[in-house]
Amino acid sequence: MLAKRIPSILPAMTSQEALEVTKIYSVAGLLKNNTGLVSDRPFRSPHHTVSTAGMIGGGTIPRPGEATLSHNGVLFLDELPEFPRAVLEVLRQPLEDGEVTISRVHASLSFPAKLMLIAALNPCPCGFSSDPSRECSCTASDIRRYQKRISGPLLDRIDITIHVPRLEYSDLVKTAPQESSSDIRQRVEAARLIQQQRLKQFGLYANAQMQHKQIKKLCRLAPDAVSLLKQAFTKLNLSARGFDRVIKVAQTVADLSGSTQIEAGHIAEAIQYRNEFQVISRK
């Protein structure tokens, strides 16, 4: 339910993004009759029985797969460990480069795949490993085997992990007004505008698109933020990719708060998001 609502808080597609998505869906034969430009961000949710070709694209005449059909939108994978490992591993390239390359004997084709990956999984096979009121029936080896279905390199490409506990009855029935998606979207669009202005010299529009050289040039860290990041790099054994991704998430947190530089609190929040899956795994 949460994943399906993510597109409602994302910025509206630009005309260029809409044109890219429309081209993809036209090539895939998924445009409805008398349809103009696709204006809504894609949301794709393939079943865990999807093949490698279905995920990344392929065929005798290569067609776009789910990764490309999620371009400029969301790819949602529910029950992540249930997907075949080979299917998950082919997502490394689009998550890193924003495109997929399909090689055939006579040609090599590249499809765009700048997507937001959202995945959901239980903490263990029975689902109650971290539940405060239900006893888990899984052994420690069951849990380790279940979680090892997701490789370290794939996890290293996931910026944010959140533990979502089971809701209590009082949470489900309360009537107090909550923040609407439209209100959240306004904050997201304001942060995106800041990013566009910062990155326009490089032809980019979002922090996630930054490479190491742009991070070094554009991301301003307060002295205490630098100190905290150094500690995290050592204690958490961050890879070079993980190091850059922590800074990019922290920069986004700073943009959402209207800060002109990355403070220690922004780094701490980014580190917490990145480390939560490992904390839950150890539990």
Image (cartoon, rainbow, N blue to C red):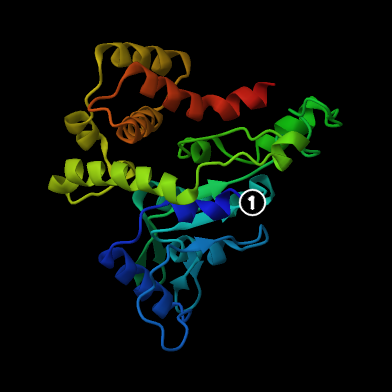
Residue 203 percent across, percent down from the top left: 18, 51
Residue drawn at (49%, 35%) of the image = 160
Residue at the farthest front position: 176
Residue at the outermost left position: 201
Left or right: 106, with 221 as reference point: right
Q: Residue 80: image x %, image y %?
A: 63, 47
The local secondary structure at tag 1 comes to loop
Asked whether the viewer can see residue 265, the reply is yes
Q: Is residue 178 above or below residue 39?
A: above
Q: Nearer the viewer, residue 84 or 218?
A: 218
Q: Depth check: 102 or 166 in front?
A: 166
* Picture residue at 32% right of the left edge, 30% below the top: 254
- In the picture, measured across the screen, residue 16 lies left or right of residue 168, that is left
Question: Residue 252: percent from the left, percent from the top?
Answer: 34, 35
Q: What amino acid is labelled 1 in the image? A: Asp
Q: Position of residue 15 (x, y in %)?
A: 27, 67
> As displayed, is residue 134 above or below residue 237?
below
The answer, for residue 91, to whether it is visible in the render is no
Residue beneath disc 1: 78
Quadrant where the C terminus is found in the figure: top right
